[in-house]
Amino acid sequence: MFPSVPIVSRKLSEDVKLGNCIIPKDTAILCSILLMQRNPKIWPDPMKFDPDRFLPENSKLRNPYAYIPFSAGPRNCIGQKFAILEAKIILCAILRKWRVKSVKTLDTIKYGCSIILRPTEKVLIHFTPKK
């Protein structure tokens, strides 16, 4: 829902036919990862937090390039596997001991982009210990 890098640019290595249009080799293009991840044609209810959408049985018919938070191809992020593993470990450590709830709702969070996507104001979170 909130990729750290919302837009990537690439230079075409060959002519590409898109519908009735030919985009020539060496054209610089922008790929909006943010918009791809919010496309309801690919992701039913895209703004809903739904980890089950990534289960193998729910992913088998989806294009492998539909979810590319670290870009894709030969110029993708070399640290993506480490980043995913690190995020899982941190989330497991937190969620084992705490209930986590945001003060704001998803639709009220404002964000901006410089090099990475980030909230423009503080996002406060309540941590309640589990019993």
Image: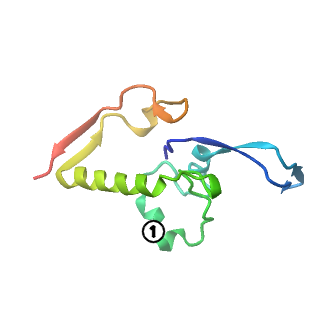
Q: Is residue 101 above or below residue 130?
A: above
Residue at the far top: name it: 121
Judged left or right of residue 129, residue 20 is right
Q: Is residue 32 above or below residue 111?
A: below
Rendered location of residue 119, percent (x, y)? 44, 31
Colour mapping: rainbow
Rendered location of residue 104, percent (x, y)? 35, 34
**Which residue is denoted by mark 1 in the rendering?**
55
Q: Is residue 61 above or below residue 38?
A: below
Q: Is residue 71 above or below residue 117?
A: below
Q: Nearer the viewer, residue 110 or 15?
A: 15
Q: Which residue: 14% across, 51% down?
A: 130
Which amino acid does the dot numbered 1 rest on?
Leu
**Splitting the image into 4 quarters, where does residue 6 fall?**
top right
Rendered location of residue 117, percent (x, y)? 51, 36
Q: Which residue: 62% across, 60% down?
A: 65
| Residue 18 shows in the view | no
Q: Nearer the viewer, residue 66 or 87?
A: 87
The secondary structure type at the circle numbered 1 is: loop
| Residue 128 shows in the view | yes
Q: Which residue: 60% across, 66% down?
A: 62
Q: Which residue: 47% across, 30% down?
A: 110
Q: Nearer the viewer, residue 105 or 36?
A: 36
Numbered circles on residues, count: 1
Callout 1: few (<14), some (14-19), or many (20+) C-alpha neighbours within 10 Å?
few
